[in-house]
């Protein structure tokens, strides 16, 4: 049986991954866990999400599916923040006999849930047609993520993945300040980067793997395999934990990105990769956000933004000039492209005016007065106007990213990039 769960948390607390970790231990009383649990991030632009828009899935070999379903539902009722307006839990249970039939159907549903906007009725209709057991609470929006997570479990070979070691606090400490030794996280990073990432932000001197909300997570270490995230955790000094789980996940994979051929294709609440030309000098607006437009081959324009939380990334964006050829990756809301990564493909030449150089003496001429041209003081050679000289842009072509403190869950860090034809500039 595959079990998918979503939307049990709220902005104030709880975490669906904690419920997954708890059930992972408890469900062994009813059978055998067959593979590592999944943490699946869905479309990051959805306005209904509580925090990270994550669903979980686990796979269990069991002879008593009814008991498993009853136990999962009772735990959701106990732990989910159902009183929160935006919390609408859902659970889906795929019996083994339905795996083959539902594999392609839920593969498509997974991709749509990560890239598109799915209505609740579409998920309910699919559940009804397939006849699989499910349980929705309130409006049942969590059924969308639960189905998508089941689709990920049925199609493990179809999607890129990373791992996250999630450590959970003792229950009596939920909502209290976390006790950690900050320097130990930098030590863990030094000993495991680039095989782990987003543990700390070196340039901004921040520990980014420790949340600030009242949820049960103490920290989460992301990396390329279970062994390396476990090694990183062994170097961390923090308060005692209740439990942990290592999830296989689509975090850090760019799974949410859609390749757009033109700006006309772009819709709000979607994420894209788009090539275009900078059409105006970037402008810093109130709040410290940096905005600039890009234009496609049809002459259409869209504003791109490096928002204040991207910190030093904005220094790079401010150096862009009209004519620069770029590729941006990120999410779109309110017709504004929120940049996660940028590839500078070709820099436009930038010129400044200078007094002409004497061809005989090799020195810059001096002005002879307004509208009277230029003259070499040494030999008397004359010229009529200034010359244009190309300036150093102080900017290198290549691929850049926002710092770890601003990275979205699904965005692929540049340490994972495999492109050999592009110069890579990781944010550290």
Image (spheres, rainbow, N blue to C red):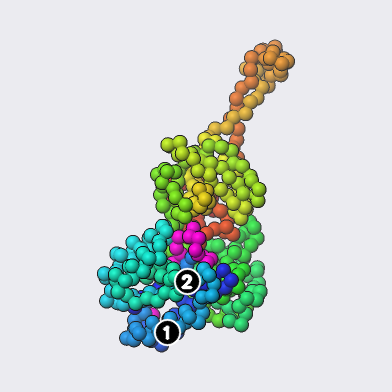
Q: Residues within 10 Å of mark 1 (few under 14, many from 20)?
A: some
Q: Residues within 10 Å of mark 2 (few under 14, many from 20)?
A: many
Q: Any magenta on residue 40?
A: yes
Closer to the chain start, of discs 1 and 2, is 1
List the residue tagged with mark 2: 88
**Mark drawn on residue 43:** none
Tell me where residue 403 appears, x and y as whole percent: 58, 55
- Residue at 50% x, 60% y: name it: 47
| One can see residue 247 in this view | no
Judge by depth and name the residue closer to the eye, 427 or 116: 116
Is residue 61 rendered to the left or right of residue 281? left
Tell me where residue 304 appears, x and y as whole percent: 53, 46
Q: Identify the image quadrant of the N terminus.
A: bottom left
Q: Image quarter for residue 104?
A: bottom left
Report the magenta stretch's main SS. loop
Is residue 94 rendered to the left or right of residue 213? left
**Mark drawn on residue 71:** 1
- Residue at 51% x, 52% y: name it: 333
| One can see residue 267 in this view | yes
Vertical placement of residue 214 versus 115, above or below: below
Give the magenta range: 33-52
Q: Identify the image quadrant of the C terminus.
A: bottom right
- Residue at 48% x, 60% y: name it: 46
Tell me where residue 309 appears, x and y as whole percent: 61, 55
């Amino acid at each position: 049986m595959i079990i998918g769960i979503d939307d049990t948390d709220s902005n104030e607390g709880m975490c669906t991954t904690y419920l997954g970790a708890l059930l992972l231990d408890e469900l062994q009383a009813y059978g055998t866990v067959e593979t590592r649990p999944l943490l699946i991030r869905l479309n990051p632009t959805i306005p209904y999400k509580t925090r990270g828009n994550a669903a979980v899935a686990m796979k269990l070999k069991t002879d008593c599916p009814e008991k498993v379903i009853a136990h999962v539902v009772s735990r959701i009722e106990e732990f989910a923040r159902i009183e929160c307006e935006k919390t609408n839990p859902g659970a889906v249970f795929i019996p083994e006999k339905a795996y083959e039939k539902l594999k392609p159907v839920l593969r498509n549903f997974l991709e749509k849930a990560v890239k598109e906007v799915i209505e609740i009725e579409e998920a309910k209709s699919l559940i009804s047609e397939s006849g699989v057991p499910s349980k929705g609470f309130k409006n049942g929006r969590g059924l969308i993520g639960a189905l998508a997570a089941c689709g990920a479990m049925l199609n493990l070979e179809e999607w890129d993945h990373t791992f996250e070691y999630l450590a959970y606090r003792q229950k009596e400490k939920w909502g209290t300040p976390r006790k950690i030794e900050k320097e130990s996280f930098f030590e863990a990073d030094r000993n495991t980067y680039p095989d782990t990432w987003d543990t700390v932000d070196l340039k901004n001197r921040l520990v980014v793997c420790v949340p600030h909300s009242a949820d049960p997570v103490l920290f989460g270490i992301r990396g390329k395999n279970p062994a390396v995230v476990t090694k990183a955790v062994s170097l961390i000094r923090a308060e005692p934990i209740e439990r942990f789980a290592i999830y296989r996940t689509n975090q850090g994979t760019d799974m949410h990105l859609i390749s757009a051929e033109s700006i006309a294709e772009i819709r709000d609440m979607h994420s894209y990769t788009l090539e275009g030309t900078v059409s105006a000098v970037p402008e810093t607006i109130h709040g410290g956000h940096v905005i600039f437009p890009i234009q496609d081959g049809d002459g259409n324009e869209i504003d791109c933004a490096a928002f204040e939380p991207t910190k030093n990334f904005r220094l790079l964006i401010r150096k862009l000039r009209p004519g620069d050829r770029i590729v941006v990756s990120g999410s779109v809301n309110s017709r504004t492209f929120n940049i996660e990564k940028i590839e500078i493909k070709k820099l436009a030449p930038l010129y400044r005016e200078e007094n002409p150089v004497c061809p005989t003496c090799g020195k810059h001429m001096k002005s002879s007065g307004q509208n009277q041209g230029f003259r070499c003081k040494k030999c008397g050679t004359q010229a009529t106007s200034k010359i244009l000289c190309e300036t150093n842009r102080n900017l290198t072509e290549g691929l850049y990213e926002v710092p770890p403190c601003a990275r979205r869950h699904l965005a692929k860090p540049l340490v994972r990039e495999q492109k050999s034809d592009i110069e890579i500039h990781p944010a550290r």
